[in-house]
Image (cartoon, rainbow, N blue to C red):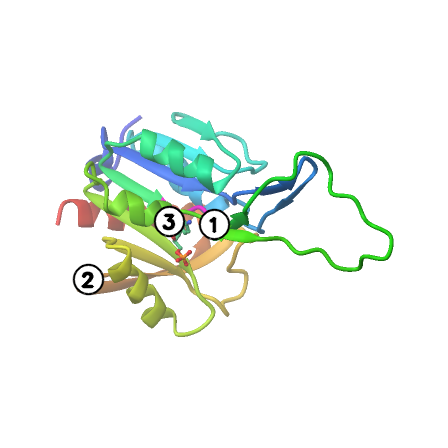
Amino acid sequence: MSLRREDARLAGQRIVISAGPTFEDIDPVRFIGNRSSGKMGFAIAAAAARRAADVVLVAGPVTLPTPMGLRRVDVRSAAQMHAAVLAELPADVYVGAAAVADFTPQRVAPSKIKKQAGVDTLTLELVRTTDILADVAAHAQRPRLVVGFAAETDHVEQYARGKLEKKKLDLIAANRVGIAGSGFESDDNALMVYWRDGERALGPAPKTQLADALLDLIAERLHA
Ligand code: C5P
């Protein structure tokens, strides 16, 4: 297999990618989750493996097949994803494409929570999860390039740039909403990528093509 010259820039680079949702258990049969399909993160991982990068894909609960040429680590909760990602450092690049739950139940009920006669409400106490992306960016073994995602509905640039700064990222890819077919469960997407002194619009395009465009940008910034 031969690579385009620009593709070869990621050969041998260690790239850790998180993808998919996390499920936060409430009791043995119920959980809090979200609609992330994992397609974008899996597409980035597959494209990076095609460029001969050394890829680790940390996957939340998804129904996607494992792309060729990479190592996959399956996790369920935000806490498990946090531990699995940090265990893979050091790395050259981290791409946080997972839709990590922001809150998790304070305690998991050991047995199924039952309805009670005459009681019409149930209160769940939730606590914040640890920010994996911010922890990777602040880590002693910080990857040379830390890339985050942002799902924003409005003030996209303002919120995305706020996250870039606050989480100390090198790149942030914001989903461009309001574009037909873009979003969580779709096969297509459009991204607006920001870094400290630049920006680039990618797509709209199938997630597989968008993954390659994002990797081109990652390779560029890695060698900037
Ligand atoms: O702050 P917000 O959740 O919008 O930021 C989204 C980015 O942060 C995504 O890249 C997501 O993977 C990451 N994130 C994380 N750990 C969390 C929450 C979000 O790594 N607990």
Q: Is residue 43 above or below residue 126?
A: above
Which amino acid type is marked by label 1?
A: Ala
Question: Is the CB–ligand 1 distance for label 2 below 8 Å?
Answer: no
Inter-mark Cα distance, 2 to 3: 21 Å
> How many residues crowd around disc 1 within 10 Å: few (fewer than 14), some, or many (20 or more)?
many
Percent coordinates x, y for residue 101 in the rendering: 50, 50
Q: Is mark 3 within 8 Å of ligand 1?
A: yes
Q: Residue at x 32, y 72 (%)?
A: 158
At which x and y percent is residue 45?
39, 37
Q: Which residue is tagged 3?
A: 131
Q: Which residue is mark 1?
A: 99
What amino acid type is highlighted by mark number 3?
Answer: Asp
Q: Are marks 3 and 1 in contact (CB under 8 Å)?
A: no
Res 33 label: none
Residue 98: say if magenta. Answer: yes
Q: Image point 28% across, 62% down: which residue?
A: 200
| Badge nearest the viewer, 3 or 1 | 3
Q: Which residue is identified by label 2? A: 196
Amino acid beneath label 2: Arg
Bounds of the magenta segment: 96-100
* Magenta stretch encompasses residue 65: no
Q: Secondary structure at mark 3?
A: loop
Tell me the crowding category of disc 3: few under 14, some 14 to 19, or many 20 or more residues within 10 angstroms, Cα based.
some
- Looking at the image, which residue sits at the far right? 117
